[in-house]
Image (tube, helix red, strand yellow):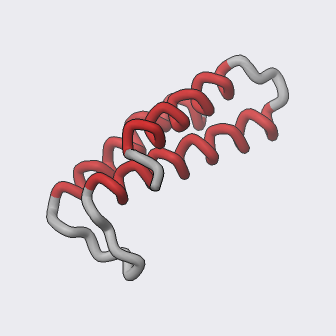
Amino acid sequence: METSSYLRRQAAFYLRLSEFCPDEPIANHLRFKAADYHQRALRSEFNIGHDGIPGDARFARGMASIEEDLAPSLH
């Protein structure tokens, strides 16, 4: 099973890679991959089930951090 630290490193890698990509469609794809890894890390940290119901209220704060982390990159 992938650990949350591995998933976060992958998210950071793809986000950083997107910053250096001159091709906008590819850069967007890399940012979406980063967001996917970040979401998977949050789900593993907070034990989100397949039904999408969070284990506790910390998940909502974690999802907000995704938007904050990716907002500058998406514009």
| Residue 48 screen position, x and y as percent | 32, 68
In the image, 22: left or right of 4?
Answer: right
Q: Count up the numbered dots.
A: 0
Q: Is residue 34 left or right of residue 9?
A: right
Q: Residue furthest bottom?
A: 51
Q: Is residue 62 above or below residue 71?
A: below
Left or right: 55, with 2 as reference point:
left
Residue at the extreme top of the image, as rendered: 20
Above or below for 37 versus 27 = below
Residue furthest left in the image: 57
Residue at the image position 52 percent from the left and 47 percent from the top: 37
Question: Residue 47 lies in what quarter of the image?
Answer: bottom left
Return the x and y of residue 11 as percentages of the image width and height: 52, 37
Residue at the image position 65 percent from the left and 21 percent from the top:
19
Residue found 28% across the figure and 49% down from its top: 62
In terms of depth relative to the viewer, which is nearer, 3 or 46?
3
Give residue 38's quadrant in the image: top left
Q: Nearer the viewer, residue 48 or 28?
A: 48
Look at the image and tell me in which quarter the C terminus lies: top right
Q: Residue at x 29, y 52 (%)?
A: 45
Which residue, as the protein is rendered here, is positioned at the far right? 23
Q: Position of residue 33 (x, y in %)?
A: 63, 46
Above or below residue 48? Residue 32 is above
Whole-percent x, y for residue 68 in the image? 38, 37
